Image (cartoon, helix red, strand yellow):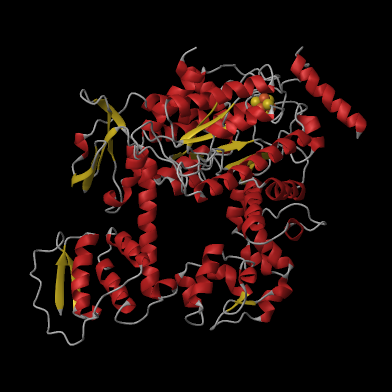
Amino acid sequence: MELTRKLEILADAAKYDASCASSGAARKDSRDGKGIGSTGGMGICHSYTPDGRCVSLLKVLLTNACLYDCHYCINRRSSNVQRARFTPEEVVQLTLDFYKRNYIEGLFLSSGIVRSADFTMEQVIEVARQLREVHHFRGYIHLKTIPEASQELIEKAGRYADRISINVELPTQEGLDKLAPEKNLANTKQAMGGIRAKIEETVSARKEASQIRNAPRAKAPVFATGQSTQMIVGADESSDALVLARADELYRDYRLRRVYYSGFSPIPEPSVLLPIKPPPLVREHRLYQADWLLRFYGFDVGELLPREDPNLDLELDPKLAWALRNRPLFPVDINRAPRELLWRIPGLGTVNVERIVAARRHSRLRLIDLQRMRVSLKKVLPFIIAADHTPRVAVLEAANLRHRFLPAPRQLELNFNAPPPATPQDALMALSGQL
Amino acid sequence: MITATIQPTFSAWRGQARELLQRGIRPEHVDWCDATQTPALLMEEPAAYTARPPTDIKVPAEFLNLAASVCAHTDARRFAILYRLLYRLTWGGERHLLSHPADPDTRQCQVWAKAIGRDIHKMHAFVRFRLIGVDEATQREQFVAWFEPEYRIVQLATPFFRKRFASMDWSILTPHECAHWDGQDLTFSPGVSQSEVPDADAHDDLWRTYYRSIFNPARLKVQAMQSEMPQKYWKNLPEAQIIHELISSSGERMKQMIATPERPVKPMPDNAYLKKLHGRKRGAEGEG
Ligand code: SF4
């Protein structure tokens, strides 16, 4: 099979993995003139496809032949998709050629499972090994690992990769039993625990190595700096509360860098076991917003999703929805309130909270100051007190406060009831500005 | 009134600003001009200074970084506002000015610096190298790229490429300034026109194949793409040539997916590993 055709099949097979991050790697570069590449600092999105997703890595499968039967996946054994397989050398060459042209920041490699978990992992590791050891590639490598693979192989993968990931796929074992009968949550967690231990061991060993001043300098061990995972949303019945509770557990217990949420979307080889109707794209977006609130704003899952209402409001962002349920806490005085309370004001992000805390040391803040920080006044006004503003009690208590924040009706229709934007033709028109 | 006519670079501004500051010239008495924009004006004789110059001027490192960014901007007010900020930081005694994000001068400079940061980031992302040959003597591959940044960021943005692509020879050409790396030195030369750059690379087709295949037609979000990759960059991105095609065919592809008859579940193949997996699971369930 021609290389172009293989690339077509094996990139198509990989596109359902939402992860694309290339940030958070240890600093390395190629100034020594050997090899190529660098990592460290902010990740770079080298392109965007019309589905709004960033292209930062060459994301491919080594092969899309697979023994497993995960029903949301185009590569499952029950699918009639055409199968292909790259040789390790082909992936290595593609990565280097793309990298030198600055198309990408590195490689994200995963694979369908052939023969066994260990056999598959060995193939994947071989690509990373060649890149690092033969070509001195210093760009980003993300390897997908298989929880059933041996600890030894997972550790080997971690030595070459900047990031490793295992997808939990669905938040509950019941969901997996139905849709991914070969996958097992307990195995996944156990493997994640092993990776976490290895990452932490490496971090402390590195610290130690850097503290030893005497020559010969101890060589710091190398291991991936982070792990991440993905959950598919809308393929089973799981509520947002279940999804977020699982994510929260993974962040806490396994120190994951990121949990990706991937709204299930129709695939070319549909399975009888899957819903025909995909969830609205906005659900995925709301989950990401809630995820940020958990990680950076001090919220916990129960606050965002009270028991009687286990799904996120699709029309309002989760912080705003929380604030509307907790109005007695407002208004908050932006000139006095502690950070933790400022974080809870709808429309204020962490960056602006820092600006407010810095600025109020100099003067009492007025609305004009917020405006200069590009805060959306429309959103914050009912919830804050500033030097020249106190909201009328009636506004905050009004039963129709929610309506103030709903998008205009036409947009509502566009955003939430139909897959946005309405048709590809509309999208093209919007692009060219022609009618 | 003093007219300070300078080349529009950070180092020119810094030299001039240092001198004015030492003489205690107040910001409202300086008129900053870009030498490339105005007919050459002589700097007027300064009025005899009235204030005692501070023995040594200290500014936070943070200010110098900010100033280097702001000078790369093209807003005509940048030199004047930057000088006012500098004056207030030193003579004005407002030493914490930079940590005061509600101050209009600080804020304005931060907004400019942010635009510069974004432009640099986009340059790191959207430069596309084309292979033009291999140096016979050194055997190093040689690449050229054409890029059109919004601001004067070539010197700020290119150290990144040196770190990443140290082992290849490359030139990045832009309308204002060009950067060249030969494995030893990073050098700069005046801007050129696009006609000097080859307009394709043999790998562009393979790259477009990848771009086409990684796109998911079931999740069209054109707005999201455009806000991160504005149309002004498209003309120099090989993959952007197929954006229209991808968008216009996505509706049809989506319909096909939905119309495809659902595939039945296939029985488990005769595979030892799979059997072990399923067996273990059943075992675990039995115990629990
Ligand atoms: S293991 Fe499951 S998700 Fe992974 S490629 Fe195979 S079928 Fe797809």
Residue ID at (38%, 37%): A30
As drawn, the residue found furthest toward the bottom would be B50
Q: Position of residue A175 (x, y in %)?
A: 79, 36
- Please say if B113 is above or below A259: below
Quadrant that contains the N terminus of chain B: bottom left
Number of marks drawn:
0
- Please say if A306 is above or below A331: above
Nearer to me, A89 or A48: A89
Residue ID at (56%, 81%): A389
Q: Position of residue B207 (x, y in %)?
A: 42, 28
A368 left or right, relative to A154: left
**Ligand 1 is found in which quarter of the picture?**
top right
Nearer to me, A283 or B146: B146
- Is there any visible trace of residue B189 in the rendered image? yes
A391 left or right, relative to A188: left
Which image quadrant is residue B71 in?
A: bottom left
Q: Position of residue B281 (x, y in %)?
A: 83, 27
Q: Position of residue B166 (x, y in %)?
A: 32, 37
Residue ID at (18%, 79%): B23
- Is there any visible trace of residue A376 in the rendered image? no
Nearer to me, A315 or A285: A285
- Please say if A273 is above or below A83: below
Residue ID at (23%, 34%): B197
